[in-house]
Structures are given as structure tokens and as C-alpha cells.
Image: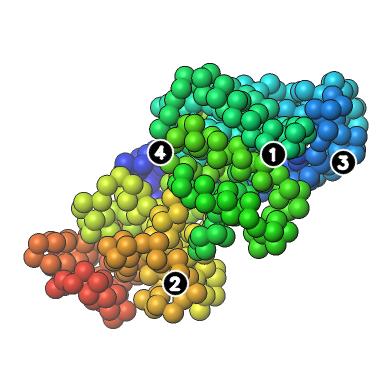
Amino acid sequence: MTQQPETIDWGPFGRPLFDDEAAKGLSRVGVIDVGSNSVRLVVFDGAARSPAYFYNEKIMCALGAGLSETGHLNPQGRVRALSAIRRFAALAEGMGILPLTAVATAAVREASDGPDFREEVLRETGVKLWIIDGEEEARLSAQGVLLGWPGSYGLVCDIGGSSMELADLSDGRVGQRVTSALGPLKLREIKGGKKAVKEFVRETIARLHNEMGNETGMRLFLVGGSWRAIARVDMERRNYPLTVLHEYRMSSRQISKTAKYIDQSDLQDLRGRCNISDTRMALVPLASIVLRELIRVFKPKDVAVSSYGIREGMLFEQMPRALRERDPLIEACRFAEAKDARLPGFGRLLYDFVKPLFPRANWQRTRIIKAACLLHDVSWRAHPDYRAEVTFDNATRANLGGLKHYERVFLGMALMHRYTSKTDKTRFAPLFAMLDDAQIKDAQILGKAMRLGAMLWLSADEPPGVLKWNSRQRTLRLVLTEHARPLFGEVAENRLNALASALDATVSFTFKK
């Protein structure tokens, strides 16, 4: 008999929240971000803590082009932006997600015809635009970072077309915020060439540094399309094997090398190799000037790229506090298990089954083990010949928050070993170099343990048995319940022996009486 959710011991990760009414209300959330360079619609499937992008479309409009000279929105950009919002409103109506939450940032708030554009948008599309100031833009961007890194601390830097904002994060809360005119569209309009641009950047960042309290040595989170484009160039320069931008890390030295690489490269050739749009690539050299000076002055201890920003911050704003505080990785994996696994809930039992093999695992490793167990069966619909590769691809490229790049590879490798022991000739082999030998071995052990556990399904709330592991004596013992005896056949015994071999252990098994 299946236990009721309120009677289940959910262990150290707590009860899932995505079935609560407050979370169900986030199952479809549509937001429009009217920026200086682009207009974007994102529809989140936000019931899980790490939301899926149900729909995501961007149109480059350059609303802020020429703003410094004319004081008005770019006329062509205005026409394109209105057309984009009209399309987005129609899409939202078809999806049944009206009303949309829509914000406009630097270009609309600074242009003399910004209020007129807002009224036109409301009249023509029914979408109510909220024109937010720089500090509010910084706050929402920082909240987007918190969506992916709950409890984060450091400095969030969000660059748009016409402005750049900084926000301080401490203990998962947004603190001091400042704004500036360091968007590349604005910089492009400075008279006097590159020398004048660099001088303006130096003076502005010095002022921001003073306003932020002369903070240095913090973690720096980069938000915005121009930063992501620079990170993509950095990946190209380094021949980095994983092109997921979220959680990509760069050192100050790497950023300096990439800025020089951009200066020395043919931008059209670089654009093609990095799959960056013409419009975005034209702004990258200016953005790289800003980033180099930002790094020089603030001296961050490390730099992380965040794909989450103002739009994700708008979703975070609507989340109940209990959901905000949850681990985005674990909640997303639970959501995937509930939606796609053949026996939802078994991942929790599988975690209890395999965890004795990792007695020294810290909290970071423990959450990856938990995630692997929750995801161990979500790709069962894939063809058996490709299932191992599908699981690896999903783990390394899925939209998952709170997951470092090497942790993605560890998770993917563990899930590959859940389905196969042959990983040496896979096309993903270059990614394995992101792990050291100990991590590779642990991923293999975890995968083989899940492979064994998957043979012992009883139900989502009845443990099939326990693994007893003595690392000093190198002995592994499987103790199964009497109810699980019929499940332990020749294949299961072979999988137990394979696990023991990976552990370099002698093995035995018995049944509870």
C-alpha cells in the first residue's frame, strides 16, 4: 500500500513542493523584457525550483541605438519592438497565460518618448509595460542569480545595451545597488574613439567602486548577453569541451587573454565560429573593455557566468519563500522523476540504497548522488542502444541550476554507468577530462550501484534491502528483504559482482529472515 506524502520520511532533502498550490500557480509564467538591445518573451514552467523554459524567443530591436544623441527611442527599433510585443501577446493568449508580466529597462526609462511608447504598447497589444529604474533592474537581476545559486554572496554585474548595473549579494539577500551608462550601445556613441571610451569606462567604474563601498575580492556573477558572448569566445579560445554558459567560470587572467583575442580576431570569422549574432558581436569589443576594467578594479576571486537574470528574477519574485529556499538541482530532478520515471518515488529509496558506499561524501557530493538517483530512470523512453548517451547528454546540457560544469560531467558519467559499462569509446570522452581519477571512479561506482538497485524495484515506498560497505576490509555485502528474493536473479548477481569489482572488494549477499 502506497504511503501518503505526509507520512513519508523524505530524509535530509525535505518534502517536494511542486504539488503545493502555491507552486502549481507557477506552472506557466510569461514575462517580457524590453531591453535597449532586444525584446524577449520567456514562458517558464516554474512549478519546480529550477524552471524549464517552456517558450523562449528574442528579437533584436536596438531600441536604445542613438539615444544619447537624439534623446528618443530608435524609430526603426520602436516599430520592431511594438511588432515583437504584439506577436508575444498573441502567443501568450494562445498559451492561455495572460496577463504577461512585462518590464522595460534603460532605453525606455531614459527616452523622452518612453512614456508615449508605453501607452502605444498598451493601446495596441494590451500589454502593460512597467518601466523600472536602474536600482530595481539591478535587484531583479540579482534575484535571478539567486534562482540558480540560493544563499549566494558576491557581486552581480548585469550589462544591457544602454546600462550596466551592480548589486551586492550577501547571505542570499540583495543589498547595495548602483547603475551606470556602461552599456555598449551607449559607449558606441562616445566621441573621440577608443581612447575616449576607455577613459569614460575608467572614470565610471572608479565611481561605481566607491559607491559600492570599495569592495574587492568577491565572487563576480556576470549577467547579460554581452557577457555571455564574451564567455562563448573564451570557450572557443580555450577549446573548452562543454558549451553550456550557465555556471561557466573564468579567471581574471583568462578574461584578459580573451579580451586580447577579441582585439586581434576577425569579428565575422569569430562570430561564425562562436554562433553569435551580428548585432551582438558588434558590441562585444566594447563590452570587453568594460569587463577588463571591472576585473582590474574589483579584483574578483572568481567569475561565474549566469544565464539567469532579470527575467528569472521576475519569476523568483513570484515564488513562495519555501520554494525559494529549496535546492534548485534537487527540486528540478524530483520534478523530472515525477513527470518521466516509470516508478516515481523510487529515486529516494535508491539514494538510501547507494549512500553507504560514500560515507565521506560532503554535502556537495551528496546532492549530486541524490540528483543521480532521482534521474536514474527518466530517460527510459530512449532507444536502448542510445540510452546511456541520452542520459549523459541530458545531464550535461539540461537547464539545471546550482550545478558546476564538472558536476554536470560527474552526474552524466554516473548515469551512463547506470546503463552501460562501456564508456571508453563514447563521443563524450573529451568531457571526461574535466574529472580527476578519483571522481571518475566514484561516478563509475555510483552508476554501477544504481544499475544494481534498478533490478530490485518493489515499490516506491518499500526498500528492497541494504548495501553494507567496509572500506578498510574491502568487503561489500548485500542484504535483501525476503520480499525481494525473487528479484535477485542471474543478471542482478552479475551487477552486484560488477559493483564489487569497481570497489576492488570481495562480495557476499544474504536475505533477511
Disc 4 element: loop
Rendered view: 360 above or below 128: below
Mark 2: amino acid: Ala
At x 47%, y 19%, the residue is 213
Could you tell me which secondary element the residue under label 2 belongs to? Answer: helix
Does residue 18 lie above or below 385 as drawn? Answer: above
Tell me, yes or no, whether the two marked residues, 3 and 4, touch with CB atoms within 8 Å.
no
**Closer to viewer: mark 4 or mark 2:** 4
Question: Which residue position is annotated with label 3?
Answer: 80
Q: Earlier in the sequence, mark 3 or mark 2?
A: 3
- The reply to whether residue 241 is visible in this rendering is yes
Between residues 433 and 182, which one lies in front from this camera angle?
182
Distance from the alpha carbon under mark 4 to that under mark 2: 30 Å
Q: What is the distance, in whole Å, between disc 1 and disc 3 at their CAs?
A: 30 Å
Q: Are marks 3 and 2 in contact (CB under 8 Å)?
A: no
Q: CA distance from mark 1 to mark 2?
A: 43 Å
Q: Quadrant of residue 195?
A: top right
Q: Would you say the residues marked 1 and 3 are in contact, meaning their CB atoms lie under 8 Å apart?
A: no
Q: Earlier in the sequence, mark 3 or mark 4?
A: 3
**Residue 173 appears in the picture as rendered:** no
Residue type, label 1: Lys
- Foreground mark, 4 or 1, reads 1
Task: Kindly identify which residue carries mark 2.
Answer: 429
Q: Residue at x 41, y 67 (%)?
A: 432
Q: Residues within 10 Å of mark 1 (few under 14, many from 20)?
A: some
Say if mark 1 contacts mark 2, CB within 8 Å.
no
Query: In the image, what residue type sits under mark 3?
Result: Arg
Look at mark 4 in the image and give the residue it sits on.
301
